[in-house]
Image (spheres, rainbow, N blue to C red):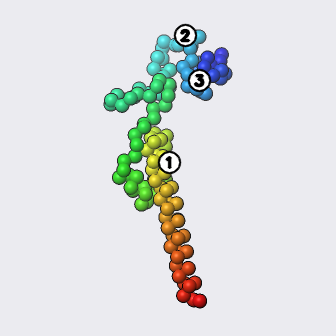
Amino acid sequence: MFCKNCGQELNDGMQFCPNCNTPVEANAPIEPAQPYAQQPYPAQPSYGAPQPPYGMPPVSQEPASLGLRFVCWFIPIVGIILYFVKKDEKPVYAKQCLKASVISIIVNTVVVVLFYGVVFAMIGSTMY
Ligand SMILES: [Zn+2]
């Protein structure tokens, strides 16, 4: 059978299209013995947050706090580690940490290059 949304070929027993995540209309009846085993993800605890669309992975849109981005800014390695730890669970949070770290590295590099440029220019001007 094929996905009715995108035409991706589907194996028998697939609940969701691997290409576009559209729920597959089951032609064969689902085995009643294991109703919960068919769910692709465990039930989410309801804490008031908007639930992701059915069939999509549970992804937190929680942003990184200003204080955390501050830490990433001053200690870029923290942001890079946080990115790899949190990128699946909290992509928004992880990207903000990574972005703060990358900007910090770039700015620090530019400052150091400018600093040495000025120092060498001053040394050069005093020698001649
Ligand atoms: Zn599809």
Amino acid, disc 3: Cys
Q: Judging from the image, what secondary structure is the residue with disc 2 in?
A: loop
Q: Quadrant of the C terminus?
A: bottom right
Earlier in the chain: of badge 1 and badge 2, it is 2
* Position of residue 39 measured from the top left corner of the image (x, y, whole percent): 48, 22
Q: Measure the alpha-carbon separation of dots 3 and 2.
A: 17 Å
* Mark in the foreground, 3 or 2: 3
Numbered badge on residue 84: 1
Q: Is mark 3 within 8 Å of ligand 1?
A: yes
Q: Residue furthest bottom?
A: 128
Q: Judging from the image, what secondary structure is the residue with disc 3 in?
A: loop
Q: Which residue is mark 2?
A: 29
Q: Is residue 128 above or below residue 11?
A: below
Q: Judging from the image, what secondary structure is the residue with disc 1 in?
A: helix
Amino acid, disc 2: Pro
* Position of residue 28 measured from the top left corner of the image (x, y, whole percent): 58, 11
Amino acid, disc 1: Phe
